[in-house]
Amino acid sequence: MNEQAKKGALYIFLSYLLWGLFPIYWKMLEHVTAHEILANRVLWSFVSMVLLLVFTRKLRDLKATLQTMKEKPKQAAALVIASFLVSGNWFLFIWAINDERVIETSLGYYINPLMSVLLGVFVLKESLSKAQVFSVALAAIGVAIITISYGQLPWVSLGLAVTFALYGLMKKTIQVEAAVGLTLETFSVTPIAVAFLVYWWSKGELLLFSGSSSTDVLLMLGGAVTALPLLMFAAGAPKIPLSMIGILQYITPTMTLLLGVFVYQEPFSVIQFVSFSFIWLALVVFTLSQTKWYQKRHLMTRKQEKGSA
Protein backbone atom coordinates (compact mmCIF):
# COMPACT_ATOMS: atom_id res chain seq x y z
CA MET A 1 0.00 0.00 0.00
CA ASN A 2 1.28 3.46 -0.87
CA GLU A 3 0.91 6.43 1.48
CA GLN A 4 -2.37 7.57 -0.06
CA ALA A 5 -3.90 4.10 0.31
CA LYS A 6 -2.72 3.90 3.93
CA LYS A 7 -4.34 7.27 4.67
CA GLY A 8 -7.52 6.14 2.94
CA ALA A 9 -7.66 2.89 4.93
CA LEU A 10 -7.10 4.84 8.17
CA TYR A 11 -9.91 7.31 7.36
CA ILE A 12 -12.33 4.48 6.52
CA PHE A 13 -11.33 2.51 9.63
CA LEU A 14 -11.85 5.56 11.87
CA SER A 15 -15.21 6.38 10.28
CA TYR A 16 -16.53 2.86 10.89
CA LEU A 17 -15.03 2.91 14.39
CA LEU A 18 -16.90 6.13 15.22
CA TRP A 19 -20.16 4.75 13.80
CA GLY A 20 -19.66 1.66 15.97
CA LEU A 21 -19.41 3.90 19.05
CA PHE A 22 -22.60 5.84 18.24
CA PRO A 23 -24.78 3.74 20.61
CA ILE A 24 -22.72 5.01 23.56
CA TYR A 25 -23.34 8.62 22.51
CA TRP A 26 -27.09 8.29 21.99
CA LYS A 27 -27.45 6.27 25.21
CA MET A 28 -26.24 9.36 27.07
CA LEU A 29 -29.36 11.09 25.73
CA GLU A 30 -31.85 8.35 26.54
CA HIS A 31 -33.79 10.80 28.79
CA VAL A 32 -34.60 12.78 25.60
CA THR A 33 -37.25 11.50 23.17
CA ALA A 34 -36.00 10.10 19.86
CA HIS A 35 -38.04 12.77 18.03
CA GLU A 36 -36.25 15.64 19.76
CA ILE A 37 -32.84 13.98 19.36
CA LEU A 38 -33.49 13.60 15.62
CA ALA A 39 -34.66 17.21 15.22
CA ASN A 40 -31.55 18.46 17.01
CA ARG A 41 -29.31 16.10 15.04
CA VAL A 42 -30.65 17.47 11.76
CA LEU A 43 -30.45 21.12 12.83
CA TRP A 44 -26.95 21.00 14.32
CA SER A 45 -25.64 18.82 11.48
CA PHE A 46 -26.71 21.55 9.09
CA VAL A 47 -25.10 24.25 11.26
CA SER A 48 -21.88 22.20 11.51
CA MET A 49 -21.74 21.69 7.76
CA VAL A 50 -22.30 25.39 6.98
CA LEU A 51 -19.49 26.31 9.39
CA LEU A 52 -17.27 23.72 7.74
CA LEU A 53 -17.98 25.10 4.25
CA VAL A 54 -17.18 28.61 5.50
CA PHE A 55 -13.95 27.42 7.13
CA THR A 56 -12.82 25.44 4.04
CA ARG A 57 -13.99 28.17 1.66
CA LYS A 58 -16.42 25.92 -0.20
CA LEU A 59 -19.46 28.18 -0.17
CA ARG A 60 -18.88 28.80 -3.88
CA ASP A 61 -19.18 25.04 -4.45
CA LEU A 62 -22.48 25.10 -2.56
CA LYS A 63 -23.82 27.95 -4.73
CA ALA A 64 -22.67 26.19 -7.90
CA THR A 65 -24.37 22.97 -6.82
CA LEU A 66 -27.61 24.78 -6.06
CA GLN A 67 -27.51 26.27 -9.55
CA THR A 68 -26.96 22.81 -11.02
CA MET A 69 -29.89 21.46 -9.01
CA LYS A 70 -32.14 24.12 -10.56
CA GLU A 71 -31.14 22.89 -14.01
CA LYS A 72 -31.48 19.20 -13.03
CA PRO A 73 -34.71 18.82 -11.04
CA LYS A 74 -34.41 15.01 -11.00
CA GLN A 75 -31.14 15.26 -9.09
CA ALA A 76 -32.71 17.75 -6.71
CA ALA A 77 -35.63 15.39 -6.12
CA ALA A 78 -33.24 12.48 -5.50
CA LEU A 79 -31.35 14.59 -2.96
CA VAL A 80 -34.56 15.47 -1.09
CA ILE A 81 -35.62 11.81 -1.07
CA ALA A 82 -32.15 10.84 0.19
CA SER A 83 -32.43 13.39 3.00
CA PHE A 84 -35.75 11.91 4.17
CA LEU A 85 -34.41 8.36 3.94
CA VAL A 86 -31.32 9.11 6.01
CA SER A 87 -33.43 11.05 8.53
CA GLY A 88 -35.73 8.04 8.86
CA ASN A 89 -32.71 5.82 9.32
CA TRP A 90 -31.32 8.14 12.01
CA PHE A 91 -34.64 8.20 13.87
CA LEU A 92 -35.08 4.43 13.83
CA PHE A 93 -31.48 3.90 14.99
CA ILE A 94 -31.76 6.42 17.87
CA TRP A 95 -35.12 5.05 18.96
CA ALA A 96 -33.87 1.45 18.87
CA ILE A 97 -30.70 2.26 20.83
CA ASN A 98 -32.66 3.96 23.61
CA ASP A 99 -35.32 1.21 23.57
CA GLU A 100 -32.65 -1.40 24.39
CA ARG A 101 -32.56 -2.89 20.88
CA VAL A 102 -28.85 -2.42 20.21
CA ILE A 103 -28.44 -6.01 18.96
CA GLU A 104 -31.29 -5.53 16.49
CA THR A 105 -29.54 -2.46 15.05
CA SER A 106 -26.36 -4.48 14.52
CA LEU A 107 -28.37 -7.11 12.63
CA GLY A 108 -29.76 -4.35 10.41
CA TYR A 109 -26.32 -3.11 9.42
CA TYR A 110 -25.10 -6.66 8.82
CA ILE A 111 -28.02 -7.15 6.42
CA ASN A 112 -27.58 -3.76 4.73
CA PRO A 113 -24.86 -4.74 2.17
CA LEU A 114 -26.96 -7.69 1.01
CA MET A 115 -30.04 -5.47 0.77
CA SER A 116 -28.01 -3.15 -1.47
CA VAL A 117 -27.23 -6.15 -3.67
CA LEU A 118 -30.94 -6.90 -4.08
CA LEU A 119 -31.64 -3.27 -5.00
CA GLY A 120 -28.84 -3.48 -7.55
CA VAL A 121 -30.50 -6.52 -9.12
CA PHE A 122 -34.13 -5.35 -9.14
CA VAL A 123 -33.64 -1.60 -9.69
CA LEU A 124 -30.34 -1.22 -11.55
CA LYS A 125 -30.67 -4.59 -13.35
CA GLU A 126 -27.23 -5.75 -12.20
CA SER A 127 -26.35 -9.42 -12.53
CA LEU A 128 -25.18 -11.65 -9.67
CA SER A 129 -22.60 -14.41 -9.59
CA LYS A 130 -23.53 -17.80 -8.14
CA ALA A 131 -21.63 -16.95 -4.96
CA GLN A 132 -23.60 -13.72 -4.53
CA VAL A 133 -26.91 -15.53 -5.07
CA PHE A 134 -25.80 -18.07 -2.45
CA SER A 135 -24.89 -15.30 0.01
CA VAL A 136 -28.31 -13.65 -0.38
CA ALA A 137 -30.01 -17.04 0.17
CA LEU A 138 -27.99 -17.61 3.36
CA ALA A 139 -28.96 -14.17 4.67
CA ALA A 140 -32.63 -14.87 3.86
CA ILE A 141 -32.41 -18.08 5.93
CA GLY A 142 -30.92 -16.10 8.81
CA VAL A 143 -33.74 -13.54 8.68
CA ALA A 144 -36.33 -16.34 8.39
CA ILE A 145 -34.97 -18.05 11.52
CA ILE A 146 -35.15 -14.91 13.62
CA THR A 147 -38.59 -14.07 12.17
CA ILE A 148 -39.98 -17.48 13.17
CA SER A 149 -38.42 -17.21 16.64
CA TYR A 150 -39.87 -13.70 17.18
CA GLY A 151 -43.21 -14.56 15.64
CA GLN A 152 -42.91 -11.41 13.54
CA LEU A 153 -40.53 -9.75 11.09
CA PRO A 154 -37.46 -8.11 12.72
CA TRP A 155 -38.80 -4.76 11.52
CA VAL A 156 -36.18 -2.64 13.26
CA SER A 157 -33.33 -4.51 11.57
CA LEU A 158 -35.04 -4.61 8.18
CA GLY A 159 -36.10 -0.97 8.48
CA LEU A 160 -32.51 0.14 9.09
CA ALA A 161 -31.20 -2.04 6.25
CA VAL A 162 -33.84 -0.92 3.73
CA THR A 163 -33.67 2.83 4.48
CA PHE A 164 -29.88 2.91 4.31
CA ALA A 165 -29.76 0.76 1.17
CA LEU A 166 -32.30 3.05 -0.51
CA TYR A 167 -30.28 6.05 0.67
CA GLY A 168 -27.21 4.55 -1.02
CA LEU A 169 -29.24 3.99 -4.19
CA MET A 170 -30.33 7.64 -4.23
CA LYS A 171 -26.75 8.79 -3.63
CA LYS A 172 -25.62 6.90 -6.73
CA THR A 173 -27.77 9.22 -8.83
CA ILE A 174 -26.42 12.43 -7.23
CA GLN A 175 -23.01 13.66 -8.36
CA VAL A 176 -22.22 16.11 -5.54
CA GLU A 177 -19.09 16.72 -3.46
CA ALA A 178 -19.44 15.03 -0.05
CA ALA A 179 -19.48 18.09 2.23
CA VAL A 180 -21.79 20.03 -0.10
CA GLY A 181 -24.09 17.03 -0.46
CA LEU A 182 -24.42 16.53 3.30
CA THR A 183 -25.11 20.26 3.73
CA LEU A 184 -27.93 20.15 1.19
CA GLU A 185 -29.36 16.94 2.63
CA THR A 186 -29.58 18.38 6.13
CA PHE A 187 -30.86 21.70 4.75
CA SER A 188 -33.77 19.84 3.07
CA VAL A 189 -35.14 18.64 6.40
CA THR A 190 -33.94 21.43 8.71
CA PRO A 191 -37.15 23.54 8.34
CA ILE A 192 -39.19 20.54 9.51
CA ALA A 193 -36.79 19.96 12.42
CA VAL A 194 -36.97 23.60 13.48
CA ALA A 195 -40.78 23.57 13.24
CA PHE A 196 -40.97 20.59 15.59
CA LEU A 197 -38.50 22.16 18.03
CA VAL A 198 -40.57 25.36 18.15
CA TYR A 199 -43.75 23.32 18.64
CA TRP A 200 -42.29 21.36 21.57
CA TRP A 201 -40.93 24.62 23.04
CA SER A 202 -44.41 26.19 22.86
CA LYS A 203 -45.82 23.21 24.78
CA GLY A 204 -43.06 23.37 27.38
CA GLU A 205 -41.76 19.93 26.38
CA LEU A 206 -38.43 20.94 24.80
CA LEU A 207 -35.37 19.75 26.74
CA LEU A 208 -32.90 21.81 24.70
CA PHE A 209 -31.91 24.93 26.70
CA SER A 210 -34.21 23.85 29.53
CA GLY A 211 -31.59 23.98 32.29
CA SER A 212 -29.29 20.99 31.76
CA SER A 213 -26.03 22.19 30.21
CA SER A 214 -24.80 18.60 29.65
CA THR A 215 -27.95 17.78 27.65
CA ASP A 216 -27.55 20.99 25.62
CA VAL A 217 -23.93 20.18 24.78
CA LEU A 218 -24.71 16.58 23.80
CA LEU A 219 -27.63 17.61 21.58
CA MET A 220 -25.66 20.36 19.86
CA LEU A 221 -22.50 18.27 19.41
CA GLY A 222 -24.67 15.58 17.81
CA GLY A 223 -24.36 17.52 14.56
CA ALA A 224 -20.56 17.44 14.52
CA VAL A 225 -20.57 13.82 15.71
CA THR A 226 -22.81 12.96 12.76
CA ALA A 227 -20.78 14.88 10.18
CA LEU A 228 -17.26 13.79 11.19
CA PRO A 229 -17.38 10.08 10.20
CA LEU A 230 -19.26 10.91 7.00
CA LEU A 231 -16.56 13.35 5.96
CA MET A 232 -13.77 10.92 6.91
CA PHE A 233 -15.48 8.22 4.86
CA ALA A 234 -15.78 10.58 1.88
CA ALA A 235 -12.08 11.45 2.17
CA GLY A 236 -10.94 7.84 2.42
CA ALA A 237 -13.21 6.03 -0.03
CA PRO A 238 -11.53 7.25 -3.26
CA LYS A 239 -8.08 6.17 -2.00
CA ILE A 240 -8.68 2.44 -1.42
CA PRO A 241 -10.32 -0.44 -3.34
CA LEU A 242 -14.04 -1.04 -2.92
CA SER A 243 -13.28 -4.58 -1.70
CA MET A 244 -11.36 -3.16 1.27
CA ILE A 245 -14.24 -0.82 2.10
CA GLY A 246 -16.54 -3.84 1.94
CA ILE A 247 -14.48 -5.73 4.51
CA LEU A 248 -13.99 -2.76 6.84
CA GLN A 249 -17.71 -1.92 6.90
CA TYR A 250 -18.39 -4.88 9.20
CA ILE A 251 -16.48 -3.11 11.99
CA THR A 252 -19.58 -1.03 12.81
CA PRO A 253 -22.21 -3.77 13.31
CA THR A 254 -19.66 -5.98 15.08
CA MET A 255 -18.88 -3.23 17.59
CA THR A 256 -22.61 -2.54 18.01
CA LEU A 257 -23.27 -6.23 18.67
CA LEU A 258 -20.47 -6.41 21.25
CA LEU A 259 -21.78 -3.27 22.98
CA GLY A 260 -25.30 -4.71 23.09
CA VAL A 261 -24.19 -8.04 24.56
CA PHE A 262 -21.32 -7.09 26.88
CA VAL A 263 -21.93 -3.43 27.83
CA TYR A 264 -25.72 -3.07 27.81
CA GLN A 265 -26.37 -6.71 28.80
CA GLU A 266 -29.06 -7.33 26.19
CA PRO A 267 -30.09 -10.99 25.88
CA PHE A 268 -28.47 -12.89 23.01
CA SER A 269 -30.22 -16.23 22.64
CA VAL A 270 -29.09 -19.39 20.88
CA ILE A 271 -31.67 -18.72 18.15
CA GLN A 272 -30.24 -15.24 17.61
CA PHE A 273 -26.73 -16.72 17.44
CA VAL A 274 -27.85 -19.24 14.78
CA SER A 275 -29.57 -16.48 12.79
CA PHE A 276 -26.51 -14.21 13.00
CA SER A 277 -24.28 -17.15 12.01
CA PHE A 278 -26.14 -17.56 8.72
CA ILE A 279 -25.79 -13.84 8.05
CA TRP A 280 -22.08 -13.86 9.01
CA LEU A 281 -21.53 -16.78 6.62
CA ALA A 282 -23.45 -14.90 3.92
CA LEU A 283 -21.17 -11.89 4.40
CA VAL A 284 -18.04 -14.07 4.20
CA VAL A 285 -19.24 -15.60 0.91
CA PHE A 286 -20.30 -12.19 -0.43
CA THR A 287 -16.96 -10.58 0.53
CA LEU A 288 -14.99 -13.39 -1.11
CA SER A 289 -17.05 -12.93 -4.27
CA GLN A 290 -15.76 -9.34 -4.45
CA THR A 291 -12.07 -10.31 -4.37
CA LYS A 292 -9.87 -10.36 -7.46
CA TRP A 293 -8.98 -14.00 -6.68
CA TYR A 294 -12.62 -15.09 -6.94
CA GLN A 295 -13.31 -12.98 -10.02
CA LYS A 296 -10.27 -14.42 -11.84
CA ARG A 297 -11.29 -17.94 -10.84
CA HIS A 298 -14.87 -17.29 -11.99
CA LEU A 299 -13.62 -15.93 -15.33
CA MET A 300 -11.36 -18.99 -15.86
CA THR A 301 -14.26 -21.35 -15.09
CA ARG A 302 -16.49 -19.59 -17.62
CA LYS A 303 -13.77 -19.81 -20.28
CA GLN A 304 -13.32 -23.53 -19.58
CA GLU A 305 -17.09 -24.09 -19.84
CA LYS A 306 -17.19 -22.27 -23.18
CA GLY A 307 -14.16 -24.25 -24.40
CA SER A 308 -15.70 -27.59 -23.49
CA ALA A 309 -18.98 -26.57 -25.13
Image (tube, helix red, strand yellow):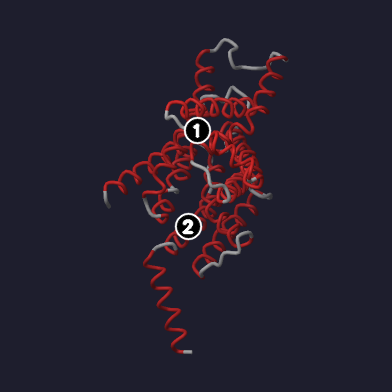
Residue denoted by label 1: 60
Say above or below: 260 vs 304: above
Instruction: Name the residue type under label 1.
Output: Arg
Say above or below: 261 vs 35: below
Residue at x 61%, y 35% (from the top left corner): 91
For marks 1 and 2, the one nearer the N-term is 1
**Eye-nearest disc, 1 or 2:** 1
Residue at x 49%, y 68% (from the top left corner): 131
Question: Residue 105's quadrant in the figure?
Answer: top right
Residue 295 visible somewhere in the drawing: yes
Residue 262 visible somewhere in the drawing: no
Residue lying at the far left of the rendered structure: 2
Instruction: Name the residue type under label 2.
Output: Leu
Give the tally of numbered discs.
2
Mark 2: secondary structure: helix
Mark 1: secondary structure: helix
* Image position, residue 297 (x, y; %): 39, 73
Residue at x 59%, y 38% (from the top left corner): 67
Residue at x 41%, y 56% (from the top left corner): 243
The circle drawn on residue 235 is none
* Image position, residue 282 (x, y; %): 50, 60
Q: Is residue 246 left or right of residue 3?
A: right
* Image position, residue 224 (x, y; %): 48, 28
Q: Is residue 32 left or right of residue 297?
A: right
What distance separates the C-alpha of mark 1 from that of mark 2? 42 Å
The circle drawn on residue 283 is 2
